[in-house]
Image (cartoon, coloured by chain):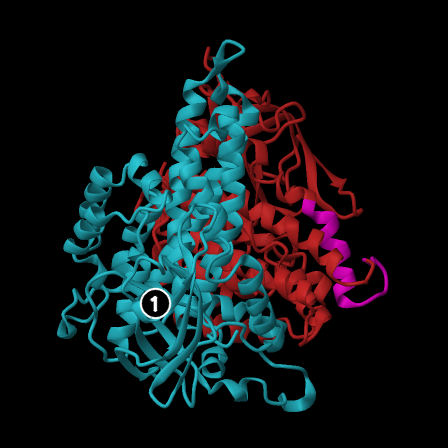
Amino acid sequence: MRDLFDSSVERLFSDLVTADAVLACEGGEWPTELWTAVEASGFTLALVPESLGGAGAAWADVCGVLRLAGRFNLPLPLPEAMLANWLLGASGLAAVSGTLSVAARGTLRLENGRVTGAAVDVPWGRHVRHVVAVAAGAAPAVVLLPTEAATVVRTVNTAAEPRDTLKFEAVVPLASAALPTALSADVLKLGGAMMRAAQIAGALETVLAMATTYAGERVQFGKPIGSFQAIQHQIAVLAEHAAASVMSAEAAFAESDDRLARLPVMAAKICASEAAGIGAGVAHAVHGAIGFTHEHALHLTTRRLWSWRSEFGSLTDWSQQLGRALCGAGSQALWPTVTAGVLAGYEEKMTTPTLTLFAAPQGGAGLPWGGPSGGLSA
Amino acid sequence: MSIDQFKYSRIPPEAEALRAEVRAFLAEALKDYPAVRRADSWMGFDAEFSRRLGAKGWVGMALPKRHGGGEASPFARYVVIEELLAAGAPVSAHWFADRQSGPQILHYGTDAQKERHLPAICRGEQFFCIGMSEPNSGSDLASIKTRARREGDKWVVNGQKVWTTNAHRSHYMIALVRTGENSKRQEGLSQFIVDLSLPGITIRPIKDLTGAEHFNEVFFDELVLDADALIGTEGQGWGQVTAELAFERSGPERFLSSIALLQTLIDAVGRSPDALQAKEIGRFAARLVTLRNMSLAVTAQLAAGNNPAWEASVVKDLGAVFEQEIPEVAQLLCELPPTVQGGSDHAQVLAYLTQMAPSFSLRGGTREILRGIIARGLGLR
């Protein structure tokens, strides 16, 4: 399945996701034709069970698709739509076709069958018909909301990708269900982090290829600049971080199934977020002034790296959560945690109702897990 | 070379099943072992401990049973060695034989050489060192000058090796020496198994900056070797050495050298770290998880019979940066000066690893050599 997915998506993106198409989207256009082609390919429903009309693919099958979305600067909420439909399916709700995104941050509450509050940093919020969110309330609930009912505050990131705030006032969700007990209230933040980690890995593959090619072509002092050790070693460091990002994203997708693999996902987003800045910096250093121009395509990818690393939890946010969990468990638990690939006890704490997360710790040793900053209440 | 060669490779269940037994053994064997000695890890020398591991079947465990090994999978061996390193067990005595010399003798050795060395390696009784660098040949290994000349059915060796870890307490050295003059420097090199008890060999430990003695200079003065000291093919030494680099550069010892400090750091900051402490410890853990996955991906490549030398260089360089960053950041996170005498476990481990850290990007291939290999794989050289 993986090879088939990768090859068909690569063909689709190479044909349609040109620099001009990306720039047009950055100018505010919605690429109707491209979205139609992507949706026709079926990938927005890839992670939906076959019984609910999807392809029933596993997370491991789609890591390549997400890396390709990053490699090609795909100016569409495909990752968000895949994640949203996965969560709908996991909650027993029907997947939706058409434009779709996720709301992983905000203040949404579901009370008496109506949703009120703000969804913050919604990718392509102004363009999509639906958003999926986890709303707080008596118990966390997965809700499907119509964006036409929202007031939109427009914001764009460094790549001019819409990251809008959607305000809802007593809106009846199109569908809702209790958040499955296996999932945590921050599931969309975690899932978004996993998507961005794979996109960053793909984007780093692009800037690595561009830097390597340019270093072989650009001649100074009578030889290609790639023959200078100083340039070679910088690009080597870029390659190392691209490899680490690919590896950590692949691990996160491979270990996720009905629930997202928290430790591998955290590791992936932390490593990718660190790599993004290092990789973009090297690529620009190698390209010199031409890479700093609007005319050159390098910025299409580096401006995405500079935003994606901060989205769905920055390096600092996830590192602090992970560090608190590890310190709370003590030094003896460090190595067993690494080899098991699981933060023992963490998921259970994340899935208990929000209020008990901040209950007095046992034994007065401080908050055992620090308390999550994820979820809609954050 | 390809980034796509970093395919996620889980440790198979049958190999994973070993872990509990190894952990239980180490918990008992090292229960009174001080933190600062755990920081020594694969530089810690304890012949008796190596023999105990040999008795458990955990030295040379991937070698064939007919030679005393356990025919274990590369992943089973990986589980054992990463548990040893994470626990800070003193594995240095048998480390080089287990990692390099044993597999090399199996691959290139004659039946007599296999019989002479492999069962004793697997018992944890025969220790090896690796003779590569010379006073004027460090990163530029192909420039070595130590020479072996044929005399009848003997070889006579003259020259000098340096920075040879454990030479002063090993039984054998596998030495790379020049046996012929060729226009291409990499040709005319051969490998010999040198019995370090022979006359004509002088071994002088070199104190490192902490005053400890791990590495040595080794002099060969008209050293006479029997014909069967040659391992592999005369003139093919360079190829034999480079073929094993992926094994040497991708293992867990390339990113676990500072794990003892990460552990004492967690103890030192306590259950409620401040924001900066939590962030740095979490970031290190994320890198640790990723480096381990990368190392396992290379192990899978090696198990499939490939030569992932490029990928191994990526693991080693990223791993060394990680190992060196831990002491640098640890000293920023707690108001606790490093101590060599007295002080807490954390202060002692911090002092030790701060001083050891420069060697992490020297041993087994310098940062500059590794980045050069990576650049070559990218087509830049």
Q: Which residue is mark 1?
A: A256
Q: Position of residue B270 (x, y in %)?
A: 70, 74
Compared across the picture, whether B260 is left or right of A319 comes to: right
User: Amino acid type of disc 1?
Assistant: Ser
* Image quadrant in which you'd find residue A323: bottom right
Q: Position of residue B150 (x, y in %)?
A: 50, 19
Say if B349 sits above or below A345 in the image.
above
Compared across the picture, whether B40 is left or right of A150 comes to: right
* Image quadrant in which you'd find residue A216: top left
Compared across the picture, whether B351 is left or right of B381 comes to: right
Which residue: 29% across, 51% down?
A: A64
Range covered by the magenta-colored residues: B338-357
Chief secondary structure of the magenta portion: helix
User: Is B220 one of the magenta-colored residues?
Assistant: no
Q: Which chain is cyan?
A: A
Rendered hue of chain B is red
Q: Nearer the viewer, residue A348 or B67?
A: A348
Q: Nearer the viewer, residue A4 or B370?
A: A4
Q: Nearer the viewer, residue B310 or B336?
A: B336
Q: Is residue B116 visible?
A: no
Q: Is residue B376 visible?
A: yes
